[in-house]
Image (cartoon, rainbow, N blue to C red):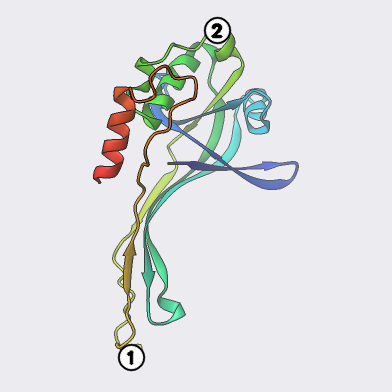
Amino acid sequence: MIAHIGFVRSGWPVVLPFHFGLADLHDGLGEQMIIHGSTGGHAFQEAAARPEGVPVSVCVSLNDGLVLGRSLYDIGAHYRSVVAYGHAHAVPEDLRGVALDALVDHVIPGRRKEVRPPSRKEIASTAVIAIPLTHASAKIADESTGDTPGDGQSRELWAGVIPLRLRARTPVASPESMDPEDLPRSVWHFVDALNDH
């Protein structure tokens, strides 16, 4: 899933997509959303420059279905979403490795154990921010069937839900992979888990 992070840059609202992780960095702030990016990124620079952090709003959502009613009023969606807001703060360099491990494990569990750890230079050139999840709400919309009793619409026209789901396609190996068919365990588990739901 992708988190969309909103912040104000030069007086304008900006929303950018990021992969994210969830972790307790043991810094007294509890579980936090972890985002990484370029040290040149505006939100990352501001978070590093301001002791209180930079105000942000975050939304993660998943569309589970299209609701098709018999009128425009009854067209909608089944979805799951989480919205959070707070002050994103820079993760100190001594905690960046832990934060990046959590992010990778959230995106594809087990992958960080299969690859080499980041070098000091890579960690130093990667900005990491954390957003405490103290102000968050979740919503699940999954009950509508597209029907409104007594709406006066003919029941001859089909109404209902088209369920949607995210599926993984066949992994594509890098051209430099020695054995393109030899998929690591993390990739197999990720693809199987995503396609079995």
Density class for disc 1 (Cα within 10 Å; few <14, some 14-19, many ≥20) is: few
Residue placed furthest toward the right? 10
In-image side of 100 versus 122 (left or right): left
Proximity of marks 2 and 1: CB atoms separated by less than 8 Å: no
Q: Residue at x 36, y 42 (%)?
A: 168
Measured in 3D between alpha carbons, the distance from the residue under mark 2 to the one under mark 1, in whole angstroms, is 67 Å
Q: Quadrant of the N terminus?
A: top left
Q: Is residue 192 visible?
A: yes
Q: Residue at x 53, y 21 (%)?
A: 91
Percent from the top left, x then y, of residue 131?
49, 33
Give the amino acid at mark 2: Arg
Give the amino acid at mark 1: Ser
Q: Residue at x 59, y 9 (%)?
A: 121
Residue placed furthest toward the top? 120
- Report which residue position mark 1 lands on: 154
Which secondary structure lies at badge 2?
helix
Density class for disc 2 (Cα within 10 Å; few <14, some 14-19, many ≥20) is: few
In-image side of 127 versus 103 (left or right): right
Which secondary structure lies at badge 1?
loop
Residue 54: quarter of image? top right
Q: Nearer the viewer, residue 143 or 51?
A: 143
Q: Residue at x 42, y 25 (%)?
A: 104
Q: Is residue 27 visible?
A: no
Residue 170: quarter of image? top left
Percent from the top left, x then y, of residue 173?
43, 28
Percent from the top left, x then y, of residue 186?
32, 25
In-image side of 152 versus 173 (left or right): left
- Report which residue position mark 2 lands on: 120
* Mark linked to residue 132: none
Percent from the top left, x then y, of residue 21?
42, 30
